[in-house]
Image (tube, rainbow, N blue to C red):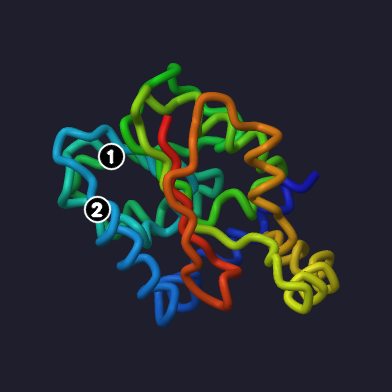
Amino acid sequence: MREAWNKVIYKIWAPVYDRFFNAGIFRKARMELFQENKIQNRDQVLLVGVGTGADLEYIHHTTQSITAIDFSPEMLQKAKEKYPNSSIQFLEMDAQNMSFDDHSFDVVIGSLILSVVPDPGQCFQEMERVLKPEGQIIIFDKFISHKRNHFTLQQLFRPVIKVLGTDVGLSFEELYQKHRHDIAIEEDKPMMLAGMYRKIILRK
């Protein structure tokens, strides 16, 4: 049910998404994310939940092997329109059930995806599954704050905000402990909004 609702929600979001999530502090955070984590020319890169392609601005010139997937055809179309003549492979696909072989990518990028999929644990496992040994997962997302006052507010508004297609009550720590296999956290850095949004780098 939530997957069908998400398709409706992101069909509505698609025309205006960049005005909110690729501007201001979000744009600054994305720039910092990829300035600090360089992608090599030979890396095979997967963007999980590419959306309107906001992250592609910072990486499309770094490698010739980029695959970008999204569950929403409308969001994916926006990304395609930004890069009509590129070598980027755009695919409509569920991040919780990817069709790629195991160990297919050197870098897997999950930007604002774990907090929107119905089953973030399954999505995280899939990201790990398709990652090559020694590969890197780059996550930029919102997670539940450890600060008590922030935690209370996030939990209070969680049911309402979920209707808009996102979850402000997701704990990365619980997700990682439950679903990790052969992957380690290299970096966990607060990025914006008092640490609610974080950059998390993992290595297989």
Q: Is residue 75 visible?
A: no
Which residue is drawn at the image coordinates 44% and 22% (left, top)?
Answer: 100
| Residue 161: quarter of image | bottom right
Which residue is drawn at the image coordinates 37% and 73% (left, top)?
Answer: 27
Image position of 156 (left or right of 138): right
The foreground one among 19 and 159 is: 159
- For residue 192, the mark is none
Rendered view: 98 above or below 119: above
Which residue is drawn at the image coordinates 28% and 59% (left, top)?
Answer: 36
Contact (CB < 8 A) between labels 1 and 2?
yes
Badge 2 amino acid? Ile
The foreground one among 54 and 34 is: 34
Rendered view: 157 above or below 5: below
| Residue 28: quarter of image | bottom left
Image position of 46 (left or right of 180): left
Which residue is drawn at the image coordinates 66% and 48% (left, top)?
Answer: 173
Work out which quarter of the rendered image holds the N terminus and state it: top right
Position in image of residue 109 (x %, y %): 41, 45
Q: Is residue 45 visible?
A: yes
The foreground one among 89 and 8 is: 89
Q: Earlier in the sequence, mark 1 or mark 2?
A: 2
* Residue denoted by label 2: 59
Residue found farthest to the bottom:
24
